[in-house]
Amino acid sequence: MLFHRVPPSLPTHGKTLRKLLVAGLSTLLGLAAVDANAAATAPVSPNSNGIITAYKLYTGKDHASHVLKGTINLKDRVPVTAIHFKYTPAHASYSWHNDPEPQYVISLSGTLKFYTRDGETFVLHPGEVLIATDNSGSGHRWDLIDDQPWRRGYIVLKPGEKDSFVPDTKQP
């Protein structure tokens, strides 16, 4: 068993936080099992190389939001403080905003196009990860660009901790 017990030493909003973490992880693990079964029978695409595509939104020295493309270091273990999930109907959009706190956003369904005020864009697909750290500055916005709702999990990073993002070496 990968995960059998939540440590009792978690900050207490007590049993409620532990129950939410267990439920959230169980949901993610359950979805991963379903996806793994589907992937076993799916044809291999040219990008099926065991790498998780990731994008990082961050605030630059110019106080503007910027984006980097990269991957997730699969060997890293990163301290986190919370997990929660959200659902947004198909064809939705969200106007200019900053992220409330540094967090991983794991996209389960829906394809989105993100924009920064400086004109940078990227498309986030299901199974990809957004590391959102543009908690100040000019912000970003997004549009759902397919016919699917956006289902995602948010995993909040522990303040001051390093994330596991590895930028592509071909960045401008």
Image: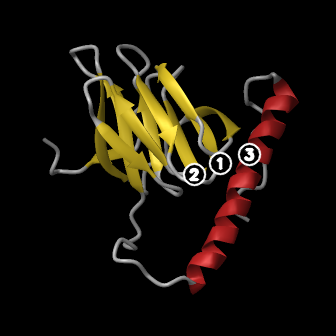
Residue tagged by mark 3? 24
| Circles 2 and 1 in contact, beta carbons < 8 Å | yes
| Amino acid type at mark 2 | Gly
Separation of residues labelled 2 and 1 (CA atoms): 5 Å
| Amino acid type at mark 3 | Gly
Q: Is residue 91 left or right of residue 62?
A: right
Counting the numbered discs, the total is 3
Closer to us: mark 2 or mark 3? 2
Identify the residue shown where x is 41% and y is 69%.
50
Q: Earlier in the sequence, mark 2 or mark 3?
A: 3
Give the answer, above or below, for where 82 lies relative to 26. above
Q: Earlier in the sequence, mark 1 or mark 3?
A: 3
Give the numbered dot on residue 21.
Answer: none
* Circle 1 Cα neighbour tier, 10 Å, few/some/many (<14 / 14–19 / ≥20): some
Where does residue 128 sit, x and y in percent of width and height?
Answer: 47, 53
Q: Is residue 59 left or right of residue 149?
A: left
Q: Front-most of 19 and 101?
A: 101
Identify the residue shown where x is 48% and y is 27%.
102
Coloring applied to the structure = secondary structure
Separation of residues labelled 2 and 3 (CA atoms): 19 Å
Residue tagged by mark 2? 110
Identify the residue shown where x is 32% and y is 39%.
121
Where does residue 161 sit, x and y in percent of width and height?
Answer: 44, 29
Secondary structure of the residue carrying tag 1 is loop
Can residue 158 be seen? no
| Residue 122: quarter of image | top left
| Amino acid type at mark 1 | Pro
Residue tagged by mark 1? 149
Identify the residue shown where x is 62% and y is 53%.
148
Secondary structure of the residue carrying tag 2 is loop
Where does residue 140 sit, x and y in percent of width and height?
Answer: 41, 26
Where does residue 133 sit, x and y in percent of width and height?
Answer: 42, 27
